[in-house]
Amino acid sequence: ATVYEEFKGKTIAELNSFAGKKKSYESSEDQSNDMFLLGSESEMSKNRYNRKSQNGYTNKKKLKNNSKALDYTYLMGSIRSQGSCGSCYAASTLTMIEARLRKKYPTLRNNPDFKISLEHALECSVYNQGCDGGYSYLVLKFGNENGFIEDKCYKPGNKCLSSCEDGGKKISVDNYYYVGGSYGRCDEEKMIEELEKNGPFVVSFEPTYDFM
């Protein structure tokens, strides 16, 4: 554990603002929408759990000859602070891409200035909601169709050009996918295989409001 200067002296309310956009429900009727349910489990959630149990997804599998441990810390760059912007989905996705590029191109490991522009992905993508949240898969969709640019290339007000005049490179995404082939088909073995073959990947989860 370490102390982060940006969090020192903050009140609980101020720290909660770092959680990004707050989802809310004003009446019990709204709680039927599973996407916005916080703090309890709907019948839809219970049914999903039961289906997974019946299909054997919740049972532990005997993994194949995978590595017992992997250390990819040498591929990771500096930690991104998203502040009060609900951009964890984008920040984590770009961090994953940077790590995979360092894995593929070892020369990048010695370049501390290499960083993909988070502001470009937040302000220019039409698929997500910027600081109000989004999805890693759609960040990659934007990268596949438009490309990303290095942090030093993007200047606010540059009309979202996917090019750089400062010697930086454009980063293209050739392929993007859910581990396991589609949403909900992932398991421990597939995650380990993906980690060994291609490097770090994004795992998304949403805690209950009590955790926030």
Image: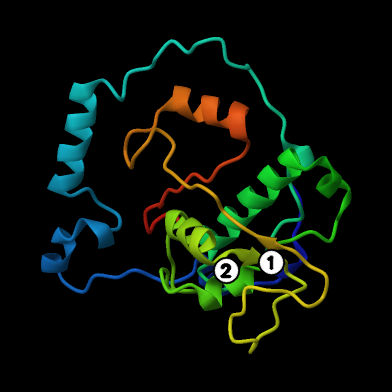
Instruction: Report the colour scheme.
Output: rainbow
Marks 1 & 2, CB-CB < 8 Å contact: yes
Q: The N terminus is located in which quarter?
A: top right
| Residue designated by label 1 | 7
| Residue designated by label 2 | 15
Residue 3, quarter of picture: bottom right
Q: Amino acid at mark 2?
A: Leu
Can residue 37 be spotted in the picture? no
Query: Residue 32: x and y, percent?
Result: 14, 59
Query: Residue 125: x and y, percent?
Result: 48, 72
Name the residue at 69% across, 51% down: 98
Residue 177, quarter of picture: top left
Name the residue at 26% across, 58% down: 35
Q: Which SS class for mark 2?
A: helix
Q: What is the crowding at mark 1: few (fewer than 14 residues within 10 Å), some, or many (at least 20)?
A: few
Can residue 146 be spotted in the picture? yes
Which label sits on residue 160? Answer: none
Name the residue at 89% across, 48% down: 110
Query: Residue 58: x and y, percent?
Result: 31, 24
Q: Is residue 46 above or below residue 146?
A: above
